[in-house]
Image: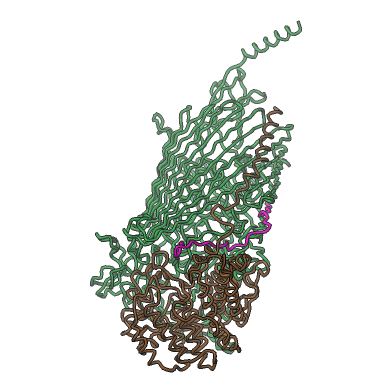
Chain colours: A brown, B green
Amino acid sequence: MKKIKILILTAVVLFAGFSCEEALDINTDPLAATSADPNAVLPYVLVQYSNRHVTELGSRIPDVSQYFSDTFNSPKNGTTSIFLTGNTWRMMYTQVLGNLSLVKADALAAGATSNNVAAIATTMEALIYLELTSIWEDVPFTEAVNAQEFPAPQFDSQETVLRGVVALCDEAVDLINTRQEAGEFNVSNGDLIFGGDMNKWEKFANGLQLRALMMLRNQTGVDAEIANVLSRPLPETNADAAKLEYSGQAGALNALFNLIQTFFGGTNETSNVYGPGPPLYDLLVPTGDPRADVIIARNDLPGPSIDAFPSNSTAVLSNDVIRGDFPDVWMLPAEIDFYKAELSLKGVGAAGDATTNYANGLQNIMTWYGGDVPGATASIAQADIDAFVSAAGAPSLDDVYNQEYLAAFLHPILAWNHVRRNKVPVLETPPNSNISTYLKRFNYPPAEVAANPNTPANKLTDAPMWFEN
Amino acid sequence: MKRKLLMTVSLLFAVIVAFAQRSVNGSVTAAEDGSGIPGVNVVLKGTTTGTTTDLDGNYRLSVPEEGGTLVFSFIGLAAQEVEIGSRSVVDVQMIEDVEQLAEVVVTALGIERESRNIGYGIDVLEATELTKARETNIVNSLQGKVTGVQITNTGGNVGGSSKITIRGVSSLSGRNNPLWIVDGVMINNSQTMSGSRIAGNRDFFNGAAVINPDDVESINVLKGAAATALYGSRAAAGAIVVTTKKGKAGKGGRATVAINSSVRFDNLFRVPDYQQGYAMGSNFKYDSTARGFDWGPRIAGQTVENLPITGETGALTAVDDNGVNDFFETGVTSINNFSVGDADERMNYRLSVTSLNQTGIMPGSSLDRLTIGLNAGVNHSEKLSSKFGVQYIKSQSGGTGVTGANDPNIIGLGSFSSTLDQRQFQNWIDESGNQINVPTRAADGTPTSNNPYWIQNENLNDREDDRILGNFEVNFKPFDGFQLMGRVGIDMNDDKRLITNRKGTALRILGNFNSDNIRRQEITSDIIASYARDINSDLSFNVLAGFQFNERLFERQQITGNELLIPELFSPGNVNQVVASRDYSSQRLFGVYGSAELIYQNWLTLTATARNDWTSTLPLDNNSYFYPSVSAAFVFTDAFNIANNILSYGKLRASVAQVGNDTGPYQLNFNFFPITTASGQYGLNVNFPFQGQLAYAATSTVPPANLLPEQQTSFEFGLETQLFDGRIGLDVAYFKNINENQILALPIPQSSGFAFRRTNVGRVDQEGIEISIDATPLEVGDFTWNTTVNFSHVESTVVELSDDVEFVTIASAFNSVQVRAVPGKEFQLYAIPFARDSASGRPLIDPNSGRRIPGTAKTMGTVLPDFTAGWINNFTWKGVTISSTIDMRWGGIIKTSTVEGLQTGGLAAETLRNREGTFIDASGVIDNGDGTVRDNDVPVRNTQDYWTALNDGSVAEPYIYDASFVKLREIGVSYSLPENILSGTFIKGVQLGVEGRNLALLYSKVPHIDPESNLFGAGADGFGIERASVPSTRSFGFNVRLTF
């Protein structure tokens, strides 16, 4: 009997002993990778940014800057549900900046042959921080995206963030200028914006720097830096436009159209989802702007009021701009042209002639809608453009501001920045608003508030940001 | 010579004895059901002569020629002494022994023990309690009947899930569901979602729901770490040990054959108190398309040109109860069970076949379940035996109700309007396959909302679930007291779902489908050696040592297709876009455990257990964790010999235990994952490859550096007494659990580049008392009234999280409504209240509109109850038994979006007040802007404005209610035909029954809906949140049981 016991116990112990170690070594996810190629990570970053950007900001806040008449779950009355942009915050910091930091660190470690990858990552970082501070003002920058060293990042002032954006753009341009093209990493597949064309990335980075400097200029002297960037390559033609193209096929639809198709069927013109906001309508339709027929359908009818969706008895945004293959546009050359016109009028000599810049801007934006935009379904005769530009003549500052605003149509953050920076066009306070004016900022998302003790107290949502005072 | 003499004397003695003896035989049966009881000790009093009954309960014993008394004894039954007299046949019926409370309970690993030796809390639910009024989800059968458990379900959904928690909640990471064990084998009770829990939740049943009540012998609910310590860490939230029925011989050694048939009818449990005075529309203007928005004109039989749906001209009239009884149908459930079993000394087997066929109150909803169970055992020899059990369960459900929000398939009570005749919807499709009888857009005829019959008939929410539970066990008893047991068990689950939107469904106009195939597999094997020995007449001990291997595997493949070509063809080839995804995980665990029990004079039992686990999910060099338990049971009435007619039995019990817990698989490494979807708001996703490019993203969770096992320390003290000869039983328990080192993906500032950090964090304490009183107030002749009251109070307090974390979100719904863990509190409902004057606490009013002003989201109170209680009564008189269960939940709050919809839509009766006038919201104050406030003096624009603006700014406060309720849960009446009527027939027993479930809401402050409804389902901890739940049902039924 004793033998049996010993036998059993030995068997148990042996079985437990020698098989455990190997049998337990199975904790490796067979569906995950330990590293990833930039050509695989960049598409995620670019597409995730764009789709969240269009679905959350593009579909909800255009009635804040009032280029749409009304949107679902809009914060325009001053009540920003604390969850409204929590997804955007998470997307920007974790999905985009988090992954970009990994791409950038690998690229920098690889040396000059990967400068192109590092420059793309750095330029995208600049774009994201510029948008973060545009939505929330003070945001983590200097201590951000460094979980090891700064588990609870400090929030930086808007000036610090904007200056940081300027520095990131410089860094990107420096990386591009110090590329080692022999044996360079081929990023043409992963770069869904410019297909690896670093000259265009350089223009985009410089354009972003100018965008940030224009905001800084409201508060602080940056004309020397502006002059510097004006001397560098900037987007000049619509071929330089920074944009993510959507094929319009299932799974690659511009979200503004996808929302209509998914929930209502038909098109914007039949389902009446997005209408032109009063400033957009007033600046395009009565002025005989050639873009009016491209952007606004049924524009012989009045536009909907700021708190109403369009109907069959109002104008509506046209199917030429609300379509599945409309690109998500991050920068157009017209924006730069109008900045230059504005700077000219404000006495910045390096910007050149105001009228020329203004005319260039009008030409660029009208040819964009008239045929340069990918998948264009409408056209504007060059003669009509020329006639309009010619008639426009020398612009006033308000003219420039209005054109900056119009050129930012479908750029939810940029349009909002323009009206906050320029105060033109003048926006009416929406009816039944809980705040004294149009929305100026979002509250911090609760996830950050709860986890980061350094999150500042929320200000009232009509309190202006630093850059607009 | 000496040897010869001895032989001769011996032979002579033997002959004398033989000559003086006779043989007596008989059968020992259970008084309860007449079945034979195997293993009863039959001893001739005053001698060592004895035997035990065979598997049929029969015995044969040699006894002296005259006189003599037989003593029949068996654990848990009252011993009987019967004088033999001159009889050669002595039959005995044995009854339960309440005085000794020799109840047998099934403890961890399926080990049976006498209740008196147990040092921790166990509740036992016998088979009869489960089949008084059958439930299609066995979890619901426990409601009100077991102390300290809380059951929540999503409402009246056919094939829906039910959640059970024991002694509150312990985990911040969702590990609050107890472990389910069937015949010693761990099974999966998880609930896997297809899609979102809040946006179009399809509530499919949880894993344990497939256990067939007709096959269950008993359910033992093990609470506290000491009870479950041998099961290991997975039972930290308690364990539910199910023992299935084994084959028994019938009377006369024949097979036991039983047929049981139940039929049940389900109707709406609660119909909202709809207003019937005002029509669809707004601002007193009639609008035939305003479904669920009854702010139109007073209904006065006026003629309108466009009646709802038909568009015809006719008189506007209100439909009774807004037509809910026209739309919701009478559900019918039939449960038919056939079982045959037999046993003899060598073998036993039981085969059971059960067919459950249910149609729900939602048109087109159904659940069909076939359960085939086979249990068999063989005694190969005195030393070797083996047994096995296999259950195959096939469940098919369809027409599952969709709940939550943001899904066109939701049919909530808020979509029923006063002037909308639901019967107009009954034709939903034309010959061309177009949806009809709904409002359509003039431009292209596209539906702007859906016909509910289109939703229920054309859009699928189908599930087909195949489950095999199997176990095989070998027992070897090489010598007295020693036993070696080997057992292997498997739980295999093949779960296929198909969720579709036919092309032409409003809000999913191009159609889509999701085909979701899930495979789960769990294998558990145990080798247990045990040895029991009586050291002397006072002291005995038993020891046990075991080894366990457990492996869990999960695999899932989904195909989503968007934009259908043929409207009802749900194939990847018929869509413009296919998105495929795959998920896989496996984990393993080795455990070594032991237990030692010392019993002194059967009144003092000391038990110590220890277990060490090695898991694949913790770091290889630190994947081992040890946990001990100690418990004591002290029957003081025996120890001090103080048992008397008043205090018949008394036992004190105490235990302390510590268990560890591992974490999920693949949580230790920093990984990049291939991504198929770039997510967007409103579910507007785009997919990879995008422009032909694949996508990878890094994890958003910082992997743990030095992960430690979770740790639960548990203390329990209990008192069990029997008073007045067992007429009253009292069981009181106090417990405290400390749950530390919880492994959690802790939210960290997203600005750090990551969203979570997996780490050990936090502490949740559970502290409470449980009281159970069992009494027989009346026992007159054949009439017996037995009553049981159980009460449990538990506080599950989040003691700490992490220094820099204010809360952890446990579950998140729409409009800022969440369940949160906040230090110092029980799980809280977090939502947006009205802004209030800080001094008076009165709501602040907007002086421009007279409306209340939205405030800032905050915690509004706990979602967990203060206490739960149940009151069970059984009245028996001859063959008639009447039983009832009332249960209550007291405390906690619920946010109901259904009530929100009924009120903002002007559907609820309370919106009739001042309907045609205006009024001042007198409870509010207006901020004067100078630090002072004044009583509100601004009237609201009208009543519609008041109600529709109440939830502006996502304010949830008006829809948060005290969730307390008292329910008449169950009534059953059964009648067993007297045996003499059946004598001479082949039928041995007939039992007829009438049953009812969920019969009446005796108390609730929640208007219009069942306060038990829940949005999230069994797989999440979303207590206290309701949204568009399928209305719960009241059931009546009949039952016939025949035994042969």
Q: Magenta residues?
A: B686-715
In the picture provided, is B785 more to the left or to the right than B714? left
Outermost right residue: B2
Question: Residue B155 in the image: x percent, y percent?
Answer: 45, 58
In the picture provided, is A371 more to the left or to the right than B818? left
Please check the rendered image and state whether residue B453 is part of the magenta-colored stretch, yes or no: no
Question: Residue B885 in the image: x percent, y percent?
Answer: 50, 52
Outermost left residue: B313
Question: Residue B880 in the image: x percent, y percent?
Answer: 45, 43
Residue B893, relative to residue B256: is it above or below? below
Q: From this viewpoint, is residue B402 visible?
A: yes
In the picture provided, is B627 more to the left or to the right than B952? right
Q: Residue A371's image quarter? A: bottom left
Residue B1017, relative to residue A22: is it above or below? below
Q: From this viewpoint, is residue B91 visible?
A: no
Query: As rendered, which of B869 and B959 lies closer to the eye?
Result: B959
Please check the rendered image and state whether residue B701 is part of the magenta-colored stretch, yes or no: yes
Q: Residue B801's image quarter? A: bottom right
In the picture provided, is B481 more to the left or to the right than B945? right
Residue at 63% x, 39% y: name it: B113
Query: As rendered, which of A370 and B731 lies closer to the eye?
Result: A370
